[in-house]
């Protein structure tokens, strides 16, 4: 019987697919492979630590053959995640991505420096939205309703854990992403000096909480 695309829980053998999705969507929604000499850098920042530290909150869109073509991942508690990122995750990637000395001179160095500043994720304006997330789908799987299904799975899991609200940060220039989040009920959170980012938040209530496969 032919399997259809569906949302399921993350499995360890999805690790490479998560990294590939991250790389192919990390340049303002497009392919970032030309920007970073080491393709593992963006996944080490924005995908792999979540799957490692909170796999129970990592969900993938399975194309029906077992291959992940999209994901949503994050944490139920940003402050706790930051502590674990510093205590556990940095040591796992420090040899591959040494901390830059002096002021970063390239985009890759700027992003590598972020690895060593996880506390940047903790802002007092976000305290009412303790969870945060990242969601990415390969381009051919976008605008087909799968992003909403992924978000429903993640928000439902947060709600089951008793988490009331979630936030995310996005590049302000990524207007298609902003339209997607607006449709899902996210609203802007005022943060002083946000730079190129916009912060959005919403309650975990009112989501579909659709079925999640294993």
Image (cartoon, rainbow, N blue to C red):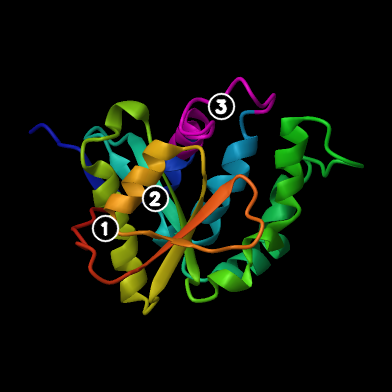
- What residue is at 74 percent from the left and 56 percent from the top? 117
Specify the segment rendered in magenta: 17-38
Q: Is residue 4 above or below residue 32?
A: below
Residue occupying image coordinates x 40% and y 45%: 178
Give the distance between the C-alpha atoms of the residues marked 2 and 1, in whole angstroms: 10 Å
Disc 3/disc 1 C-alpha distance (Å) = 27 Å
Disc 2 element: strand
**Residue, far left:** 1
Which is more N-terminal, label 1 or label 2?
A: 2
Numbered label attached to residue 152: 1
Q: Residue at x 62, y 73 (%)?
A: 124
Q: Are marks 2 and 1 in contact (CB under 8 Å)?
A: no
Q: Position of residue 122 (x, y in %)?
A: 63, 67
Instruction: Give whichever of discs 3 and 2 has the lower sequence position.
Output: 3
Q: Is residue 77 left or right of residue 159?
A: right
Q: Is residue 85 above or below residue 12?
A: below
Alpha carbon distance from label 3 to label 2: 19 Å
Percent of width and height locating residue 58 = 41, 54
Q: Left or right: where does residue 119 sit relative to residue 44?
A: right
List x then y, in percent, for residue 91: 74, 53
**Label 3 SS:** loop
Q: Residue 72: percent from the left, percent from the top?
A: 39, 50
Closer to the camera: disc 3 or disc 2?
Answer: 3
Q: Secondary structure at mark 1?
A: helix
Q: Which residue is mark 3?
A: 32
Label 1 crowd (10 A; few <14 / some 14-19 / many >=20): many
Quadrant of the snapshot with the N terminus: top left
């Amino acid at each position: 019987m032919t399997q259809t695309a569906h949302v399921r829980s993350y499995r360890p053998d999805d690790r490479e697919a998560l990294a590939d999705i991250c790389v192919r969507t990390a340049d303002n929604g497009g392919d970032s492979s030309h920007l970073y000499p080491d393709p593992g850098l963006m996944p080490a920042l924005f995908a792999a630590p979540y799957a490692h530290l909170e796999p129970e909150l990592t969900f993938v869109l399975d194309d029906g053959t077992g291959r992940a073509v999209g994901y949503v991942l994050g944490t139920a508690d940003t402050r706790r995640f930051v502590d674990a990122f510093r205590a556990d995750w940095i040591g796992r990637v420090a040899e591959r991505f040494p901390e830059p000395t002096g002021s970063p001179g390239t985009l890759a160095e700027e992003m590598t420096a972020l690895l060593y500043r996880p506390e940047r994720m903790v802002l007092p304006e976000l305290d009412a939205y303790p969870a945060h997330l990242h969601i990415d789908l390969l381009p051919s799987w976008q605008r087909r309703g799968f992003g909403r299904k992924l978000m429903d799975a993640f928000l439902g899991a947060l709600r089951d854990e008793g988490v009331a609200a979630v936030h995310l940060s996005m590049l302000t220039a990524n207007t298609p992403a902003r339209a997607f989040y607006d449709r899902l009920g996210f609203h802007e959170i005022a943060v002083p000096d946000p730079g190129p980012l916009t912060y959005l938040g919403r309650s975990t209530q009112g989501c579909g909480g659709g079925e999640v496969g294993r």
